[in-house]
Image (cartoon, grey):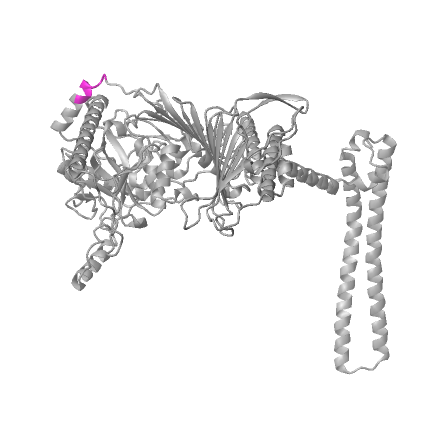
Amino acid sequence: MEVLPEADCEEDATITDDEEGVRELKSRLSNIRITPTVTHIANPRPQVDLSKCPSSYKENSSQEKLMFAMAENFRQQYALLYPDNKVLLLCPVNECGVQKFVSTTLRSTLLPYPELYDWEGCASFVSDYLTLELLDPPFELPKQLSSPTWVLQTQRGTCFDFSSVLCSLLLGAGYNAYCVSGYATKEMCLLDQSREECPLLQTQIQGKTEEPKKTLRKYSVKPPRDLHSSFEKHQEEKRQTEAKEAALKEQLEAERLQKEKERPPPDPLLGLRVHSWVLVLSGNREEPENFFIDPLTGKSYSTTNENFLGIESVWNHQNYWVNKQDCTFGCGEMTFDMGDLSKWEYMLCGLTSQSMSNISEPKTLQESEDEEEEEMDELKVFEMPPSWVTKIEISPPDMEMRFPGGMKVVQYRKAKLEKFAPYLQIDGLVTKLTIYKDLDCTQPSTVKEWFSHRGDCLDERELHTDSNVTSEHFRPGRKDALRCHRYVTLVPETERQMDFYSHTRTDGLARRIEKPFEMTETFEDRTDFLFYRHVVYGKQVKVIWAGEAFEQRPIRRVEERFHRDPSKPASKDVAERVFMMSDRRIQVTYHLEDDRIIPAWLNFMKPKEAADSQKAQAFTPQMVSGFQVDRSAKPYKNLKLHEMLEQLMKDEENVELGIRDSEKAVLQFTSTTTNVFVQPIILTLACVFQVKSILSSRKKEESNTDLLVSIYNTMRNKMAHQHMEEKERMAKEKKQRQKEKELDLLAPFQARLGLPEALTHQEALQLQTECLTEFKQLLNNKTSRIQSRIEKEIEELQKKQQWYQKSQLPLTAEDDYLAYYSEAMFRIHILKMRLSRHKERGPQKTLALVENLKRHPKLASHSL
């Protein structure tokens, strides 16, 4: 579209049929009211203090005035050529009530925050930091487009304000971004996400992955023949397929009915609701394709998304384009080549209007020469005025606070997402997701919480309300190396599961599963090759130990399994060891040898202990039974078996001792025990007591939560803040004392009196007299020094004259004498002038000192 003279168009045109239809629709829908949600603001905008606004906000430059004239000319031509189209958003007023062109409202800015270096971080920040103000009415363009600085300061704005801020950040980050003025669905315009799935719950589509087929080698062993009936197998597969198809059909039907039930009522303003979003074109920042960004939610969409119903115009900081494509069926078939004049109409003719068309196939030599000639002509074309907006700045505290008021609530389909700023909640909560069973969000099923800066390294907590099961996930850094804790209650000896960071624990514990009467532990990378331990408990009984009665669960059975130790033969390497306390038996199973199918094992029966009237049962070979794989090997002798049984019985005694002892005693006993066979049993008992220690510490951590503060964060670190304040106060006091000391004339004389707080009249008179006497003495000393200098110069000159008169010198020596004489007389003259001036100013200085002493705070009250 070429620019026509302004006289060819009249501003007051005849109302078209489309405008009449809109008026009729306005009158018919006048009773429709929109209720703002939690994220909407209905309060009036804050007033702008014009005295604090820069001059560019309150007035227009000559370039901007010329831009307004061109925009008005463009609007008139557009209304003449496209009378059925809506009015364009060209020159709305800013917050100061001054008209500004929309392209000059954008201010390309790169903020010094790494999270704002890509479009995901910028979009997320804008959607979190700002609060939406709905357009009123929703089918008309806004009359005001505030500056990004004002929008960020008030943290509120319309969708057009959102787009301006986001586009400014994207342009600063190097993206080819544009603000879009168009139409969208009701849910997108009103920021209604109650029918969308929460992003934290969206999972990837789980497709059936085919198992890789095993390649059959030529000389591989053939699999055994399948003796099952192929007909029956085929019939079974057919029945399973039919059952799956029926279940899938029922599921699809249920989903269809659910969608029908959740489908919103028809929107009477469908296709008329004005909305603004951001268009990002491919090319810059290695973006492979074009896409839309909704600044209200921070999400990206394809340019063919059905929520975007049409586009009227787009603009960036360099130019303004009007869409000439048909958007009857949405934006799915639109192209975004801004250099295509058949699809887009630009306002300013120049290099910026053809920037997209220049990225095409290589030009021939003749075409390149023609383009160079055209570019020479285009050098005189009017360019977009610079932005009138001042530099966009966001302080670190505002960046950390992020949300208006420090929190934001978003309602999704069967879910509610709450976001909090760091350190806002006393427990360090930053994100809370509540999942509901019903669409009305009245019956919660799962509550997920995310934390930050917790002293106990808690990162995530998940509560299932149906089963009352809580799962906690921790970051590395805890003393107990706890990674995950799944429980119902923090009461000891109940069902729970604990996962640990095994590489940070000395015992290599990876998982502990505890139930009321049993406990299972798994280990990783232990030097003794232990990887599994299972403990079975009995019912709680009262036990008296060290004069105190307490309840405990007696150990009935302990089972341990070990990995293969390559340094030992398999027949000597223990694979499994079982202590059966209730049956008075101990069973040891060794690893299976490579060429064997049955492992070796030993089963020990403990002899009866001594009673009041009976002696202890003696060891007999019948108390040991076992199986030795290698028949050629020598069997164990009775002495060896007796020693092994005695060692195992000592282990049981250590187990009983550990149960009745405290955790401290157990750990001490563990540290003093060097027997490798005994050590795992004692560690088992230490782990039992460790569960109670972990639960006790978790209760304390939840009742008194400590948040970690960096030493560099002087605002939140109380100790660092107090230290800085104390340091500043001491420096200020020292500076003040030094200043007072420098200005106080009586300080040296007052020190002779012992620095009294209050002076008597006699002391004040004495200070004044001493100060004046000292000052006069200084004046006399200075007079004496100047007089002695004069006398010395005169004496040296006289000696030089006598030497000259006695000596008969050549002419060259006479010249040196005359030069010396001239310099000596000059020095004498200067010294006499200094002496004369000193004598004249001496009385004046004395009177000034007297006046200063009279006004001195310590002498003024004595009226000397």
Quarter placement of the C terminus:
top right
Indicate whether 245 appears above or below 838. above
Q: Position of residue 167 (x, y in %)?
A: 32, 40
Considering depth in this image, is 427 or 348 the residue closer to the camera? Answer: 427
Q: Position of residue 563 (x, y in %)?
A: 47, 45
Considering depth in this image, is 15 or 799 the residue closer to the camera? Answer: 15
Instruction: Please identify the residue farthest to the left as the structure is shown.
Output: 17
Q: Magenta includes 29?
A: yes
Q: Position of residue 40 (x, y in %)?
A: 34, 25
Considering depth in this image, is 246 or 684 the residue closer to the camera? Answer: 684
Bounds of the magenta segment: 25-31
Q: Magenta includes 612?
A: no
Q: Is residue 589 visible?
A: no
Residue pictured at 80% horizontal, 45% vertical: 843
| Left or right: where 90 falls relative to 675 | left
Q: How many marks?
A: 0
